[in-house]
Amino acid sequence: MDFDLKTLTLAGAAAEKCDALVLLVADAFKPGKDPLSRLAADALKAGDFEAKPGKMLQAYRTAGVAATRVLLVGCGDGSGKRVQAAVQAAVGAIRSSGVKRMVVCLAADAGDEAVRAAVAATAEASYVYVSTKSKPEGRALQRVTIAVADTQPRRAAFAAAKAAANGIEFARELGNLPPNVATPTRLGEEAKKLAKAQGLQCEVMGPKEIAKLGMGSFLAVAQGSEQPPRFIVLTYQGAAASEAPLVLVGKGITFDSGGISIKPAAEMDEMKFDMGGAASVLGTFRALGELKPAVNVVGLIPTCENMPDGRAVKPGDIVTSLSGQTIEILNTDAEGRLILCDALTYAERFKPRAVIDIATLTGACVIALGAVRSGLFATDDALAQALLDAGDAALDPCWRMPLDEEYAEGLKSNFADVANVAGRAGGAVNAAKFLQRFTGKYPWAHLDIAGTAWKGGAAKGSTGRPVGLLFEFLLGQVGSAAAKPKRQAAAKRK
Ligand code: BES
Ligand code: MN
Ligand code: ZN
């Protein structure tokens, strides 16, 4: 889908030939003398339409308007959230009418937030999964113009929003693929292909190399599957090589059966989405490659299946992680932390400015926060705040959770340095405490996206979250990354 940004008055918009013109009407709407203004003003006066969120009025072949359809959509205070909801509703309403060319007119005083929300919501609401349908219908919408009063000050936000939308869509598509297609091998191939197309560096390791590295915990999860594991290392260098990178670590379980601690049958198909963290890292790199911001980022993806088998890891097995810590695997369904811990140790070699892991880690996080906010855990307050702010700005929000030492109590083992599970209570925090043991060498944050990476039920499908959050966060790191680690190093020397 093509997006463009255009300077248009409402009079200009009325002359714009397209299949659908979406006019966002905010509380502060001031009608002019053009046909669109008249239409909106008449409808408002007659009470057929209100500027309130959730209100919509459709018109067909309206006098003085070149567009075939006009949709008036209320967007209240004009905030990003309101624009998002309004555009989602409009795109939903025309979804089945085969609209190819759409113009979205933002309010005269629309800022970056509105532009970003309009692009994101259009892409999100018009997405159609096609990969494994025998008669794919595809997305009708082909060209979308975002009309604003003055394009110049909105250009940067618009370009970032387009890159983010493409990254989100890439993550969604990967997430939606069935688990017999989206195997660890396929994820490795996708990473290679992406790297080639976007000018990134990419290394994909197989079982032998992973064993040679000493990732005994990751391999323990992989050993129950016929599908060989992959360890993907992606590098995006947008700033000087001397600048410490940010490292993203994505959980890439392409199917989580639970292993020997097997899951119940109901909704087990949804465990194909257990590579949502990995998909979000790939999607973020897609966006980085397109926009090319001045920041260095490394992506690490441990990916494998979690399956029951004669060779599978058993409850009670003890393995040695890359960090040297031994782990008693009491529940093979707590596998995400077992593959992540080795990648978190591997991250040390990049001397990172910060490491953020992204994982569909616990059902407990779904109970705690539902599908609205991802769970955020962090050992560094500034990093936590930056991620919270990025989530709010990108309309991909998260919520900070605690990391008190007491939560680690249940992870004690009589036979190894640590157990991979604690009690059910506080399950999302227990999991984070397990991961924290492997992150002592850098500022660290963990995003538990178990509730946000996909939707179940009739709207079953990947959401592409938290690509929006991650990309927004990384853009916020441009410029600020250079000086800080050096200053810290200097301080330490004294
Ligand atoms: N991938 C699951 C987490 C999950 C479960 C996400 C349901 C979304 C919906 C993870 O590997 C898992 O199975 N976690 C266990 C941990 C438990 C055994 C300590 C869980 O949450 O039940
Ligand atoms: Mn599991
Ligand atoms: Zn899992």
Image (spheres, rainbow, N blue to C red):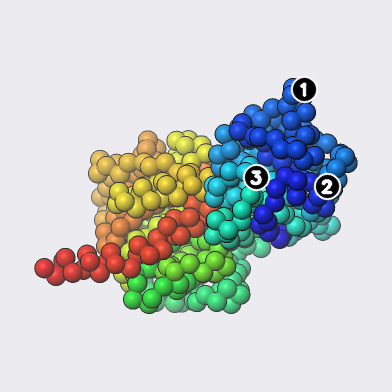
Task: Check disc 2 and give the amino acid type.
Answer: Ala
**Which residue is denoted by mark 2 in the rendering?**
67
Label 2 element class? loop
Give the number of the disc on residue 106.
3
Q: Residue furthest front?
A: 33
Q: Residue furthest left?
A: 494
First-in-chain label (3 vs 2): 2
Instruction: Tell whether label 3 touches label 1 (CB within 8 Å).
Output: no
* Rendering quarter of residue 22: top right
Label 3 element class? loop
Report the quarter where the N terminus lies.
Answer: bottom right
The answer for how far apart the CA atoms under marks 1 and 3 are is 23 Å
Kindly identify the residue that appears in the image at 83 percent across and 44 percent down. Answer: 65
Q: Is mark 3 within 8 Å of ligand 1?
A: no
Residue 445 in percent (x, y) is at: 36, 53
Query: In the image, is 80 to the left or to the right of 32?
Result: left
Residue 288 in percent (x, y) is at: 52, 66
